[in-house]
Image (spheres, rainbow, N blue to C red):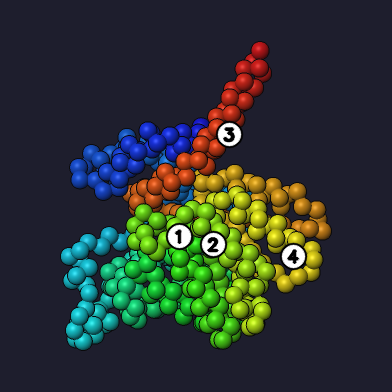
């Protein structure tokens, strides 16, 4: 595992290696020649499976995934966030064909069963069976195909088939004492996703507990106002608001004017939102208006943000001040130094302070190697935008490898 981590960090931290690696991965994710298809080329499959796949992904089947989850929890993590990697490819022609325009076409679309929605439902329900108490299930709604994509982008009601699928998923997650993240996506569909998430929270987030969380992207200029809108609705309607806060994953595809002007601006936005929710004072809420019931999950690879939130959380608990419970998460194979630092803070806590110790999760994606190639490509792109951090990981891993080699030879002699 150490050698694999060093290989990934070496590629990720050196642009002259990362650029051709990204191009190669992009070709393999969309092969036009059979010998480049990982499902047909055993050599390619073996190389990718034993390196990048095993570093970033949980497994290809239930046995592999549950084994990975067991190892992660044994390391001290509170739980996992599990997502199904398969995505539905929607080309321009299929999108156009499946976008109903007339009243009759819309009626037919509502009554016709979608194979994509059913495949999504089955894949997500299979994923639910792999998670347990306090774990999370992550949902990418656009993975259900063109009918759902169209409904989200046009702010229309989801097809009845999709509504029933979501009901099945939520019911089964509750039965397994798991929770659900509704993933953020591109802004062209995000307004529709917000509406779906709010409806799910209205139904399932009762009795002071969040089953469903919506995802807020701090790199968007609109996020503070969007969060205020969610707080307003939750306070008026009396449900618990589930908030998963991320910096953002679509910076390379979103219109630039929607994104904060600078990286420090995004950092400030992230930290301000996290601190406001932790203090239970955000905008007029907690001052002029009652702060609603809320649960917070900080998904961050930024050590400063994680440690600042943990410090504020512990200080407020120690002072007996109103405080929102917080949990943390990082992607499998990324930001392990952040995860391990948070775990160390938990281990260093005295028995009396265990209540305030961080609860840390790892986010895992599962699916066949072919299914996961697009996911691996996105992870590689994220590493490209974080060369500074991966260089730190590279040097730390390189030092550890040298130390182990030195110890090995010293033991022999």
Q: CA distance from mark 3 to mark 1?
A: 32 Å
Q: Where is mark 3, residue-wise?
A: 396
Quarter of the figure that contains the C terminus:
top right
Q: Residues within 10 Å of mark 2 (few under 14, many from 20)?
A: many
Q: Is residue 232 left or right of residue 139?
A: right
Sequence order check: which comes first, mark 4 or mark 3? 4
Q: Are marks 1 and 4 in contact (CB under 8 Å)?
A: no
Q: Position of residue 273 (x, y in %)?
A: 58, 66
Asked if labels 1 and 2 touch by Cβ distance under 8 angstroms, the answer is: yes
Q: Nearer the viewer, residue 317 or 329?
A: 317
Q: Could you say where residue 175 lies in the image, as x and y percent from the top left?
A: 55, 72
The CA span between labels 4 and 3 is 34 Å
Residue 255 percent coordinates (x, y) = 34, 61
**Number of the front mark, 4 or 3:** 4
**Nearer the camera: disc 3 or disc 1:** 1
Residue named by callout 1? 260
Q: Which mark is residue 110?
A: none
Judged from the image, the secondary structure of the residue bearing numbered disc 2 is helix
Out of 253 and 341, give the one closest to the viewer: 253
Q: Position of residue 155 (x, y in %)?
A: 34, 78
Real-space Cα separation, disc 2 to disc 1, in angstroms: 9 Å
């Amino acid at each position: 595992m150490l050698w694999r981590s060093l290989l990934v960090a070496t590629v990720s931290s050196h642009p002259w290696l990362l650029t051709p690696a990204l191009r190669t991965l992009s070709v393999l994710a969309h092969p036009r020649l059979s010998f480049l298809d990982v499902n047909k080329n055993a050599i390619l499959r073996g190389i990718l499976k034993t390196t990048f796949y095993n570093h970033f992904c949980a497994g290809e089947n239930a046995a592999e995934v549950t084994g990975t989850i067991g190892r992660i929890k044994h390391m001290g993590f509170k739980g996992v966030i599990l997502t199904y990697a398969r995505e539905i490819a929607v080309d321009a022609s299929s999108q156009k064909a499946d976008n109903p325009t007339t009243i009759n076409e819309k009626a037919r679309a509502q009554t016709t069963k979608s194979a994509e929605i059913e495949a999504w439902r089955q894949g997500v329900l299979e994923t639910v069976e792999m998670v347990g108490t306090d774990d999370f299930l992550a949902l990418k709604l656009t993975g259900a195909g063109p009918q759902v994509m169209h409904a989200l982008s046009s702010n229309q009601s989801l097809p009845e088939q999709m509504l029933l699928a979501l009901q099945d998923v939520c019911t089964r997650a509750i039965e397994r004492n798991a929770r659900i993240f509704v993933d953020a996506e591109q802004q062209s569909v995000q307004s529709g996703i917000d509406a779906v998430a709010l409806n799910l929270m209205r139904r399932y987030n009762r009795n002071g507990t969040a089953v469903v969380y919506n995802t807020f992207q701090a790199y968007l200029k609109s996020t503070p106002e969007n969060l205020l809108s969610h707080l307003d609705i939750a306070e008026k309607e009396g449900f618990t608001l589930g908030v998963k806060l991320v910096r953002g994953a679509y910076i390379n595809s979103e219109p630039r004017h929607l994104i904060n002007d600078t990286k420090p601006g995004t950092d400030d936005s992230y930290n301000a939102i996290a601190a406001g929710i932790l203090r239970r004072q955000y905008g007029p809420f907690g001052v002029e208006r009652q702060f609603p019931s809320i649960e917070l999950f900080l998904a961050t690879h930024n050590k400063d943000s994680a440690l600042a939130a943990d410090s504020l959380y512990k200080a407020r608990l120690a002072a007996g001040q109103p405080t929102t419970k917080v949990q943390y998460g990082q992607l499998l194979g990324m930001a392990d130094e952040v995860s391990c630092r948070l775990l160390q803070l938990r281990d260093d806590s005295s028995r009396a302070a265990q209540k305030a110790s961080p609860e840390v999760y790892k986010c895992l994606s599962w699916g066949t190697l072919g299914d996961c190639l697009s996911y691996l490509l996105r992870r590689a792109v994220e590493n490209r935008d974080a060369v500074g951090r991966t260089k730190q990981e590279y040097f730390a891993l390189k030092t550890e490898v040298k130390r182990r080699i030195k110890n090995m030879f010293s033991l022999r002699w």
